[in-house]
Image: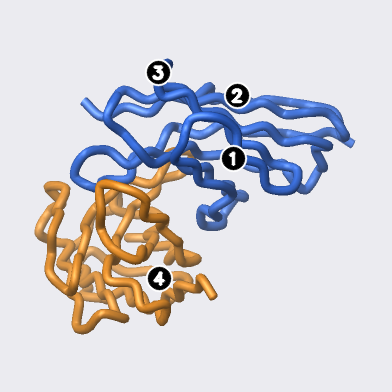
């Protein structure tokens, strides 16, 4: 089973709202990722967690705050977003973060619209 | 600069033909290469991964890797209309970052 789940599927929020995106995997993977994908563009890496610790932050604005409560869960807390943050937010997981042979499996994504 | 380059297409092939998708990458030290398929409005779905030079076949899909030329390709035999999607080449660079190419849009015409 290579399933990564994400909730919600769709989210509409105002620029003053606070919301959270959730991601879950039960494959025993120890690495989890957040990506942002704009229309007609490839996914862009935002954050990487390895063994529940943040290992990579791709200079993401502080209005995006990741959290990894345990090895199966990954959250992305959103606050004071801008309309240009509207995108598909993808969660992925892999067995480990490695410079070698680790395949990432993606969840279905959360489509976010910021008004 | 980590770069993965693909022809953006669109690539149009008739049903039953072979579709050939190409990708080059900038880091000679990269070891892991992936092809993802993404239907419009959906998330990327893993098609193939390849780590060693040569060919790797899985059903109608064949991935080819040439590390000396820093080139990876995906062949889709007996293309079907259901193969119409954007195909993303992805490479793991030093530090474990998965970097995607811009994607090639494939259209298979009945």
Crowding at mark 3 (Cα within 10 Å: few <14, some 14-19, many 20+): few
Please give left or right for residue A38 compared with residue B17 in the image.
left
> Quick one: SS at disc 3?
loop
- Chain (orange): A
Residue A11's disc number: 4
Residue position marked by numbered label 1 in the rendering:
B86
Q: Quadrant of the C terminus of chain B?
A: top right
Real-space CA distance between mark 3 and mark 2, rounded to the nearest whole angstrom: 25 Å
- Check chain identity for marks 3 and 2: say if they share one: yes
Question: How does the figure colour the protein chain or chains?
Answer: by chain
Q: Nearer the viewer, mark 3 or mark 2?
A: 3
Residue at (40% x, 18% y) in the render: B68
Q: CA distance from mark 3 to mark 4?
A: 45 Å
When asked about the image quadrant of residue A65, the answer is bottom left
Left or right, A30 with reference to B36: left
Give the quadrant of residue A71. Answer: bottom left
- Viewer-nearest residue: B103 or B58: B58
* Residue A71 visible to an observer of this rendering: yes
Local crowd at mark 4 within 10 Å, few (<14), some, or many (≥20)? some
Q: Element type at marker 4?
A: strand
Mark 2, residue position: B9
A96 versus A9 height, above or below: above
Residue at numbered disc 3: B68
Q: Chain of mark 2?
A: B
Callouts 2 and 1 close, C-beta under 8 Å: no
Q: Colour of chain B?
A: blue
């Amino acid at each position: 089973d290579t399933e990564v789940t994400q909730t919600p599927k769709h989210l509409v929020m105002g620029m003053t709202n606070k919301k959270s995106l959730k991601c879950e995997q039960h494959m025993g993977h120890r690495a989890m990722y957040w990506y942002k994908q704009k229309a007609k563009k490839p996914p862009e890496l935002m954050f990487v967690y390895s063994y529940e610790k943040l290992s990579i932050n791709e200079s993401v604005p502080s209005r995006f705050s990741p959290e990894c409560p345990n090895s199966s869960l990954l959250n992305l807390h959103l606050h004071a977003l801008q309309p240009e943050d509207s995108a598909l937010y993808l969660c992925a997981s892999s067995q480990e973060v490695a410079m070698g042979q680790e395949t990432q499996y993606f969840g279905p994504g959360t489509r976010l619209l910021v008004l | 600069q980590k770069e993965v380059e693909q022809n953006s297409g669109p690539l149009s092939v008739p049903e039953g033909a072979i579709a050939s998708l190409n990708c080059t990458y900038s880091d000679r030290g990269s070891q892991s290469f992936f092809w993802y398929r993404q239907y419009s409005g959906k998330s990327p779905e893993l098609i193939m991964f390849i780590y060693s030079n040569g060919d790797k076949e899985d059903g109608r899909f064949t991935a080819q890797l040439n590390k000396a030329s820093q080139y990876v390709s995906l062949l889709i035999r007996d293309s079907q209309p259901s193969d119409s999607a954007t195909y993303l080449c992805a490479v793991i660079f030093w530090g474990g970052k998965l970097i995607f190419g811009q994607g090639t849009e494939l259209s298979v015409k009945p």
